[in-house]
Amino acid sequence: MEKVSLPIKTKIAAWWLVVIGSTASIVCIFFAAGVILTQACTAIAIVPIMLFPPSFLTFLFGFFMLRRKKLAWLLGITILFIEVLISIWLSSLNIKAYIIGNFPPHFEYVILPLLFLPPFFLLLLDRKNFFKIAT
């Protein structure tokens, strides 16, 4: 019996999640190692600890989507939805502070929603095809 390949939209979204999740996890690990080595006890030192779990979960859900797991699809949509909401919230705070005149806009907060929206919509568009072949 021939194995049916993953739908192309799901494959693109899953690889997108794998790349984003692994890159963010590696950056968090290196950032945490740098904080530990310099013994900097500041508020910024907690950032890699807070960002590592969602980035690693993003990687795991993308990986298991490539393995055709329905639960990975559901949890991947959930974490992407949360990440989209948080990134839009950060972006709106940044734009609001720029309008008030507190500080210049940070480009990463404005571009952050664009990082999570494409895989979110690709997964939603291709859910029926994915559930036909998923286990």
Image (cartoon, rainbow, N blue to C red):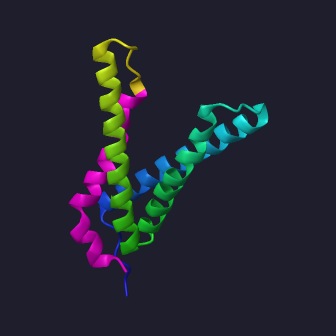
Q: Is residue 109 or residue 111 the one in the foreground? A: 109
Q: Residue at x 54, y 50 (%)?
A: 22
The kind of secondary structure the magenta stretch mainly shows is: helix
**Residue 41, position in %: x, y?**
70, 33
Q: Is residue 28 or residue 89 the one in the foreground? A: 89
- Please state, as top left, top right, bottom left or bottom right, where the N terminus lies in the image: bottom left
Q: Is residue 125 or residue 107 the one in the foreground? A: 107
Q: How many marks?
A: 0
Figure check: 38 above or below 129: above
Which image quadrant is residue 28 in?
top right
- The question of residue 125 being in magenta is answered with yes
**Viewed as shown, does residue 36 lie left or right of 5?**
right
**Viewed as shown, does residue 12 lie left or right of 18?**
left
**Viewed as shown, does residue 44 lie left or right of 111?**
right
- The question of residue 112 being in magenta is answered with yes
Q: Residue at x 65, y 45 (%)?
A: 29
Which image quadrant is residue 76 in?
bottom left
Q: Residue at x 44, y 60 (%)?
A: 62
Figure check: 112 above or below 96: below
Q: Residue at x 72, y 40 (%)?
A: 33
Taking the view exactly as shown, the residue that stands out farthest to the top is 101
**Residue 25, position in %: x, y?**
57, 48
Q: Which residues are magenta?
A: 108-135
**Residue 135, position in %: x, y?**
37, 80
